[in-house]
Each structure stands twice: as C-alpha cells, then as structure tokens.
Amino acid sequence: MSERTDVLAKDAHARIGRHAPGAGGSYLVEVNLKRDFCDADGLSALWMLHCAGVTAARAVRVGRLYELRGNLNLGHVQVAARELLCDGVTQEFRVGLPAASPDGGGCWRVEVWLKATVTDAVGESVRGALIELGLPDPSVRCGAAYHIAGKCNRNQLEKAVVRFLANSIIHRFSVSAEN
C-alpha cells in the first residue's frame, strides 16, 4: 500500500447506514486515479458539464464506489480493495470517507448509484471475486463519485447530472458540497 493511500474506517457506518449488531460491517470503498495520472473520465464529465451550461466547473475527478455489506471487517475490506478493486500502480483507495476534491479545496461531490431495484451486474461480479479470494459472502453495490471543482450553481449542476451523468430511470444520485 502506498503512503498516499488512506484507509479510513471512521464514519463508514454513518455514510452507508447502520446495521444490526452481529450482522457484520458496512463499508464504502472509493477508488481514484492517483494525481499523477490523467483522468479521462473526469475530462469527459467536465466536457459534458460544460455542454450543459455548467461552465464554472474547472476540473472533475471520477472515482469508483463500492458499497460492501455483510460479515466483513476492516481487514477483509482492505484485502478486497488492495487485491481486487484497486490497481496499486495507478490508483489509490479510501475506506469510509470521500477522497479529496480535484483541486484540494473542493466544491461539489456527486454520487451516482444504481437504484436498489436494478440488478448490479458489476456488483455481482465483484461479489463472486471476493468469494474466490476467500472472503465472507458480501453484498456489493457499485457507483461513481464525481468530484467537481468550481463555483457551480447547485440547481444547474443537478440538472446537468440528470441530463448527462445519471439516468433517472435506473440511477439515484446525490449532490453535496465538499470541504
């Protein structure tokens, strides 16, 4: 694990939701490209935001989100992130807390998830791979996090998200200010 990789479990339960005692853990893993690498998905999202009129957006970094629930502990999640979810050369991961914003000062964080009624094929594939790694059988949902730098108007940003980053039929999303 690189020294830039932060593994933070604090607030993981608050971000994912509470679980019953004895039911195992709930963890949010976010995987991002290291700052040294060009984020093509981020450049594409920035272009789409500009096309939607959100010209105040200066930069976008895109992260992959994995919600892991089940009879897991932090050690299991670290193994899963290191061995399966993250390419240690080009990516870094965090558990429980969102990654830093694109410019270090931050403006907006958009999370896009499949709705609970929609089958998550990637989540099922990850679940199978975790079982093959010898980890307890988890529930896995996948999503995306967009870290948007710029003094954007929230309403305009939400409209752009619905138009370009999320399909309201199959996705749920949230827009929140980053610190």
Image: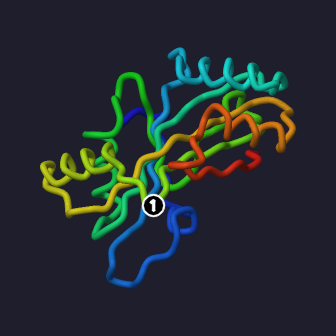
- Residue beneath the point at 41% across and 23% down: 90
- Residue beneath the point at 59% across and 23% down: 42
169 w.r.t. 54: above or below: below
- Residue beneath the point at 16% across and 54% down: 131
Mark 1 belongs to which amino acid? Ala
Classify mark 1: helix, strand or loop.
Answer: loop
Q: Which of the 4 image quarters holds residue 163?
A: top right
Q: Which of the 4 image quarters holds residue 103?
A: top right
Q: Nearer the viewer, residue 26 or 51?
A: 51
- Residue beneath the point at 19% across and 46% down: 129
Instruction: Tell me the crowding category of disc 1: few under 14, some 14 to 19, or many 20 or more residues within 10 angstroms, Cα based.
Output: few
Q: Nearer the viewer, residue 159 or 30?
A: 159
Instruction: Where is residue 144? Give x, y as percent.
Output: 52, 41
Instruction: Where is residue 26? Give x, y as percent.
Output: 42, 66
**The N terminus lies in quadrant:** top left
Q: Which of the 4 image quarters holds residue 107?
A: top right
